[in-house]
Image (cartoon, rainbow, N blue to C red):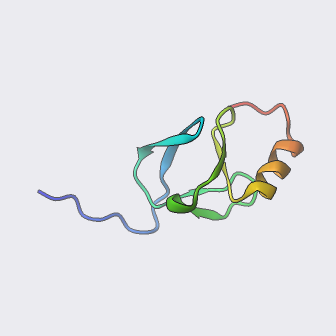
């Protein structure tokens, strides 16, 4: 029996590692921790391993890390 394709509206749960990430729950996107925008998994390039957060781009990642430098997962 084949699993039906996932709708585009499901948020993935991801475990972020150094240089890679593992999909814990399948979905098509993650949410940026700073802006709240949806990031398609195929475009996900920036995240924090310590915080287990995704970021939309490098500028947003820097803004998030500078705004709360001691936050930990």
Q: Quadrant of the N terminus?
A: bottom left
Q: Quadrant of the C terminus?
A: top right
Question: At which x and y percent is residue 9?
Answer: 46, 67
Q: Residue at x 88, y 45 (%)?
A: 67
Q: Quadrant of residue 8?
A: bottom left
70 relative to 35 in the view: left or right: right
Q: Residue at x 50, y 61 (%)?
A: 42
25 relative to 34 in the view: left or right: left
Q: Is residue 51 above or below residue 32?
A: above
Q: Residue at x 85, y 40 (%)?
A: 68
Q: Is residue 37 above or below residue 54?
A: below
Question: At which x and y percent is residue 56?
Answer: 69, 59
* Residue located farthest toward the right when viewing the structure as drawn: 67
Count numbered badges in the picture.
0
* Residue located farthest toward the bottom when viewing the structure as drawn: 8
Q: Residue at x 53, y 41 (%)?
A: 20
* Residue located farthest toward the front when viewing the structure as drawn: 19
4 relative to 70 in the view: left or right: left
Question: At which x and y percent is residue 32?
Answer: 67, 56
71 relative to 43 in the view: left or right: right
Q: Nearer the viewer, residue 18 or 5?
A: 18
């Amino acid at each position: 029996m084949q699993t039906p394709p996932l709708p585009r509206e499901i948020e993935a749960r991801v475990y972020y590692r150094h240089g890679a990430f593992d999909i814990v729950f399948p979905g098509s996107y993650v949410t940026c921790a700073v802006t709240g925008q949806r990031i398609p998994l195929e475009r996900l390039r920036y995240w924090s391993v310590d915080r287990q957060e995704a970021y939309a781009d490098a500028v947003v990642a820097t803004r998030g890390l500078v705004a709360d430098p001691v936050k930990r997962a």
